[in-house]
């Protein structure tokens, strides 16, 4: 049996990224998708290490570091040495980043409406349950095959 789920997920991800970035720009938010993922995590829990951000976003540590560099240059986040552990760097939101949260949430809601256009609430719940199962399987596989 030929399966196309992975192919569809890849295409959806690419299209979603392009549409989401367009919506962000239309709403005056000049950040990339990767920056948005990091901001989303920091809005939930500010003052995190690169490792914590990497774990929560599923982005590689080196990718997080590169994206954070760009965010620091744009004044979106700042780096500070952890006073409790001088080897750790803590990433924190700036006031500018905090001011973007409401606009970002509006764009996220627009994206969700687009995603689920034509779906019943039950179909949406079923679909998300399937996606959660796939994600759980992939996470378990990642941690068992290191």
Image (cartoon, helix red, strand yellow):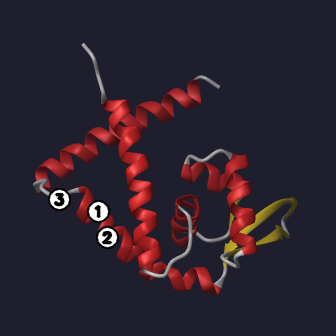
The disc label shown at residue 54, or none:
none
Marks 3/2: CA–CA distance: 12 Å
- SS assignment at label 3: loop
Sequence-first tag of 3 and 1: 1
Marks 2/1: CA–CA distance: 5 Å
Q: Which residue is mark 2?
A: 109
Characterize the local packing of mark 3: few (<14), some (14-19) or many (20 or more) Cα atoms within 10 angstroms: few
Residue 114: x percent and y percent? 25, 62
Q: Quadrant of the N terminus?
A: top left
Residue 126: x percent and y percent? 19, 44
Residue 7: x percent and y percent? 37, 32
**Taking 143 as reference, is 59 above or below it?**
below
Q: Nearer the viewer, residue 61 or 71?
A: 71
The residue at the point 48 percent across, 79 percent down is 101
Characterize the local packing of mark 2: few (<14), some (14-19) or many (20 or more) Cα atoms within 10 angstroms: few
- SS assignment at label 2: helix
The disc label shown at residue 112, or none:
1
Q: Residue furthest top?
A: 1
**Taking 51 as reference, is 25 above or below it?**
below
Question: Where is residue 24, by image quadrant?
Answer: bottom left
Question: Where is residue 116, by image quadrant?
Answer: bottom left
Report the label total: 3
Q: Quadrant of the C terminus?
A: top right
Say whether marks 2 and 1 touch (CB < 8 Å): yes
Q: Residue furthest right?
A: 86
The disc label shown at residue 117, or none:
3
The residue at the point 49 percent across, 35 percent down is 139
Sequence-first tag of 3 and 2: 2
The residue at the point 30 percent across, 70 percent down is 110
- SS assignment at label 1: helix
């Amino acid at each position: 049996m030929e399966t196309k789920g992975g192919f569809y997920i890849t295409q959806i991800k690419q299209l979603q990224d392009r549409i989401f970035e367009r919506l962000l720009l239309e709403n005056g938010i000049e950040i990339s998708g990767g920056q948005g993922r990091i901001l989303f995590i920091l809005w939930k829990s500010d003052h995190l290490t690169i490792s914590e951000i990497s774990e929560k976003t599923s982005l590689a540590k080196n990718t997080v570091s590169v994206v954070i560099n760009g965010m620091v240059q744009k004044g979106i986040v700042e780096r500070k040495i952890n006073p409790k552990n001088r080897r750790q760097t803590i990433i924190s939101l700036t006031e500018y980043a905090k001011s973007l949260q409401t606009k970002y949430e509006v764009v996220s809601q627009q994206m969700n409406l687009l995603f689920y256009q034509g779906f019943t609430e039950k179909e949406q719940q079923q679909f998300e349950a399937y996606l959660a199962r796939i994600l759980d399987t992939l996470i378990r596989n990642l941690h068992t095959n290191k």
